[in-house]
Image (spheres, rainbow, N blue to C red):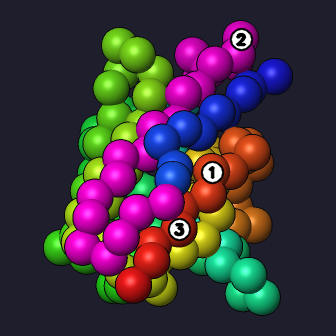
Amino acid sequence: QVQLVESGGGLVQAGDSLRLSCAASGRTFSRFSNYKMAWFRQAPGKERAFVSGIRWTVGTTDYADSVKGRFTISRDNAKNTVNLQMNSLKPEDTAVYYCAASSRGGTSPGNYVYWGQGTQVTVSS
C-alpha cells in the first residue's frame, strides 16, 4: 500500500506564503517513477479541483489557471516528497489541499488512486 501525508497548512493573511509538503511512502512507491503527483483542493460546498501536478521522473509540471504565476510545484526524489510553494495567497485559495498520485495523469480527481488526508489552508482578507 502507498501512503501520502500532507503537511504545512495553516492560517495566513492575504498576500502571505505557505509551503505544503507531501511525503510518499509504502512498498509500492518504487513504481512511482511513471506516476504523476498532484495537488487538489476542495473548498466548502465546491467540488475537488486540480491545482498543480508534476511527473515524478521527468519533472514536467502543469497548473490551474487560477494559480499560475503564484504557485510552484516541485519534487525531491531523495526524500520522496512533493512540495507546493504558494505565494501571494488570496482568500479564494482557502480550501483543504490534498496530495494525490496517479499512473494515468491528467487533472481529473477520478484518475487518481492514492490520496492523502488533506491539510487545511485558510487565507484571511
Q: Quadrant of residue 91?
A: bottom left
Q: Nearer the viewer, residue 50 or 106?
A: 50
Q: Is residue 25 above or below residue 122?
A: above
Would you say residue 32 is visible in this rendering?
yes
Few, some or many residues within 10 Å of mark 3 (<14, 14–19, 20+): many
Q: Is 3 a magenta residue?
A: no
Secondary structure of the residue carrying numbered label 3:
strand
* Distance in Å between CA atoms under marks 3 and 1: 10 Å
Residue tagged 3: 122
Residue 16, horizontal then vertical, whole percent = 27, 64
Q: How crowded is the residue under tag 2: few (<14 C-alpha within 10 Å), some, or many (20+)?
A: few
Q: Residue at x 72, y 28 (%)?
A: 3
Residue at 70%, 43% (x, y): give it.
Answer: 116
The residues bearing labels 2 and 3 have C-alpha atoms spaced at a distance of 33 Å
**Which residue in the structure is indicated by mark 1?**
119
Q: Is residue 72 left or right of residue 53?
A: left
Residue hosting label 2: 27
Amino acid type at circle 3 is Thr
Task: Point out the stretch of residues depicted in magenta.
Answer: 11-31
Q: Which quadrant of the figure contains the C terminus?
A: bottom left
